[in-house]
Amino acid sequence: MLDVRPIGIEDYTERCSKPLSELHDKLWVETYAKTHSPGMMVGPVEGQFLKMLATITGARRILEIGMFTGYSTLAWAEALPKDGRVVTCEINPQTTEIAKRYFAESLHGHKIEIKLGPALNSLKLVDGIFDLCFIDADKENYGAYYDRCMELVRPRGLIVLDNMLRGGRVLDPQDRGTKAIDELNKRIRKDPRVENVLLPMRDGIMLVRKL
Ligand SMILES: C[S@@+](CC[C@H](N)C(=O)[O-])C[C@H]1O[C@@H](n2cnc3c(N)ncnc32)[C@H](O)[C@@H]1O
């Protein structure tokens, strides 16, 4: 999707959006220095978008699947009230160690609960109800994550799914991950329990509102 946009437009959207916290900037630099796939972070504009979703929906309890080094997690936590909670699932202990240091430094870190291990296992043990769920982990399991989030999110709550365009590959899905995402996009469109919109922002953000 990005290649059909004028060069520089992503940077322009960043320059015209309020920045996230200084802690986010520090985390960004460390993630680029110490991990193999820093591009997995949602980045400043999507991070601000997610934060705003939490604020305008008045979310108090958020479930995140795919924490990585905690960039999006911090954005959620900053948007929550003092007694709010983000429960976040992550399988990678190394990136979790980085995230934990930043959560300890943040004024909002006490709102974050990490579930380390395969998300499908962690999700069996998680109790609802959540106002908002964010799916941003292994693509083959997105369908199962969506089904579990539908059980855990409250009526009129929101499910947000990232990378729903797979860099444009959904138009001709070949790999397993992209096929899974394409099937889920079509399944959500037909799901009578929800309303939804697929936004072409970044790599595609699906917003799903449970009726
Ligand atoms: C795209 S990254 C998440 C990025 C994060 N939301 C951010 O903004 O920085 C996806 C993460 O999902 C994690 N992951 C992959 N498979 C997983 C699984 N089965 N259970 C839990 N986490 C998983 C990866 O280790 C990776 O850190």
Image (cartoon, grey):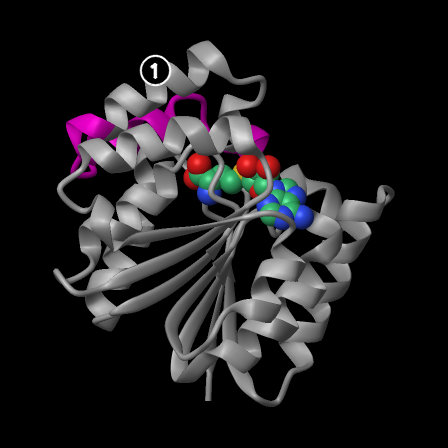
Give the quadrant of ligand 1.
top right
- Residue 165 appearing in the image: no
Rendering coords of residue 6 (x, y %): 45, 27
Residue nearest the viewer, comparing 147 with 110: 110
Left or right of 135 on screen, residue 44: left
- The answer to whether 188 is drawn above or below residue 119 in the figure is below
Could you tell me which residue is drawn at 85 percent across and 42 percent down?
175
| Magenta highlight range | 1-23
Rendering coords of residue 191 (x, y %): 64, 83
Rendering coords of residue 20 (x, y %): 20, 36
Could you tell me which residue is drawn at 20 percent across and 62 percent down?
55
Rendering coords of residue 142 (x, y %): 67, 58
The mark total stands at: 1
Circle 1 Cα neighbour tier, 10 Å, few/some/many (<14 / 14–19 / ≥20): few
Residue nearest the viewer, comparing 79 with 167: 79
Left or right of 135 on screen, residue 57: left
- For residue 7, what is the image quadrant? top left
Residue nearest the viewer, comparing 97 with 183: 97
Left or right of 28 on screen, residue 66: right
Identify the residue under disc 1.
29
- Indicate yes or no whether the magenta region holds residue 22: yes
- Indicate yes or no whether the magenta region holds residue 175: no
